[in-house]
Image: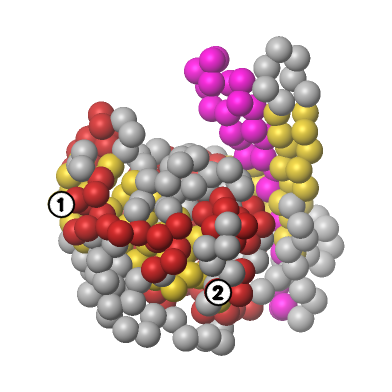
Amino acid sequence: MTDTQIRILDARTTGELLPFGALVATLRQAFAEGCVVPVRHHHTIANSGEPDATLLLMPAWHETHRSERYLGIKIVTVFPGNTVRGIPGLTSTYMLYDGRTGMQLALLDGNTITARRTVAASALAADYLARKDARRLLVIGAGRVASLIPDAYRAVRPIAHVDIWDIDPASAERLAQSLRQQGLQAAAVTDLEAAVRQADIVSAATLATAPLIRGKWLRPGTHVDLIGGFTPAMREADDEALRRSSVYIDTHEALHEAGDLVQPIRGGVIAADAVRATLDELCRRDVPARTSNDEITLYKAVGTALADLAAATMVYEAVLIAG
């Protein structure tokens, strides 16, 4: 890496250079290979007259045995008070450096990297955990991350129909219409139970604090993907869903950060050692994945700086190749 020009890449360019087929393949290699991922740093910022804000620092870097080494850090600001201003409460930026010299290489749109690597990692997990013939996808949520789920899953499974449920039916319909315009069979649904019972894959990307997915609704062979809950107070699936499922996680941090695991473990519903494997173990083929077409699998993710670094590296190297 002798090029010293700093690239500044906006959201559109960053997204265009992260197509899901290639991104899933990049993440598969990155999880199998591994890198150094320190514990993320949380800093509370007092904001007079408003809820406290948060500053998150998420670093990661390649180890010395790698021929091309990068170092990256994602900086995330979370300002809940922005809701009343009508502007996003979360903003993130990604800075990429040469892992040998520390020279800055690029500044990328962190929101785009986060959203695309999140759903790509879920699709990667589903490639090990969902039935090979899974064709019907239910998306719970209709926000920025949820809107990317169908495209990501189509990179690993023959998705033919997508149902969308959201607490705001109008948002679900807008997403369904957008998917139809892309040539995909899609429908907004209001009966969540019926939609879960019909789905081959249920993927949730919400901010729910009470379970939306009931374990008794899950038919044999379903794969459940929980993207949204990232604090111990958040839940997207109930205890019965955990009890009936073979459980997998992206990283061990999920055991301490995700309410979908923290709460049932604390309540004695499942034990921490009931988790079958992490995503890196699946990618290295250290453990078995789905064992039968009737097995219910559940994947819970909280995100990792490893995936951010892999995505940012993929964008930067694509820019170099394109000149």
Asked whether, in this view, residue 100 is left or right of residue 232, the answer is right
Asked whether, in this view, residue 235 is left or right of residue 77, the answer is left
Q: x and y percent of residue 145 in the render?
A: 43, 45
Give the secondary structure at mark 2: helix
Furthest-front residue in this view:
268
Give the camera-side residue of 200 and 209. 209
Give the camera-side residue of 268 and 32. 268
Q: Is residue 19 magenta?
A: no
Give the secondary structure at mark 1: strand
Asked whether, in this view, residue 60 is left or right of residue 24, the answer is right
Q: In the rendered image of this protein, does residue 310 appear above or below residue 167?
A: below
Q: Earlier in the sequence, mark 1 or mark 2?
A: 1
Q: What residue is drawn where x is 33% and y is 34%?
A: 167
Q: In the rendered image of this protein, does residue 70 appear above or below residue 116?
A: below
Q: Is residue 69 magenta?
A: yes
- Contact (Cβ within 8 Å) of mark 1 with mark 2: no
Q: x and y percent of residue 108 in the render?
A: 61, 46
Q: Which residue is mark 1?
A: 185
Q: Quadrant of the N terminus?
A: bottom right
Crowd rating for badge 1 (residues with CA inside 10 Å; few <14, some 14–19, many 20+): some
Which residues, given as a range, are shown in magenta? 66-92
- Residue at mark 1 to residue at mark 2: CA–CA distance: 37 Å
Q: What residue is drawn where x is 54% and y is 27%?
A: 88
Which numbered tag is attached to residue 274?
2
Residue 68's image quarter?
bottom right
Crowd rating for badge 2 (residues with CA inside 10 Å; few <14, some 14–19, many 20+): few
Give the camera-side residue of 2 and 273. 273
**Residue 204 visible, this orientation:** yes
Q: What residue is drawn where x is 74% and y is 19%?
A: 47
Residue 309's image quarter?
bottom right
Q: x and y percent of residue 206 in the render?
A: 44, 42
Disc 1 residue type (three-letter): Gln
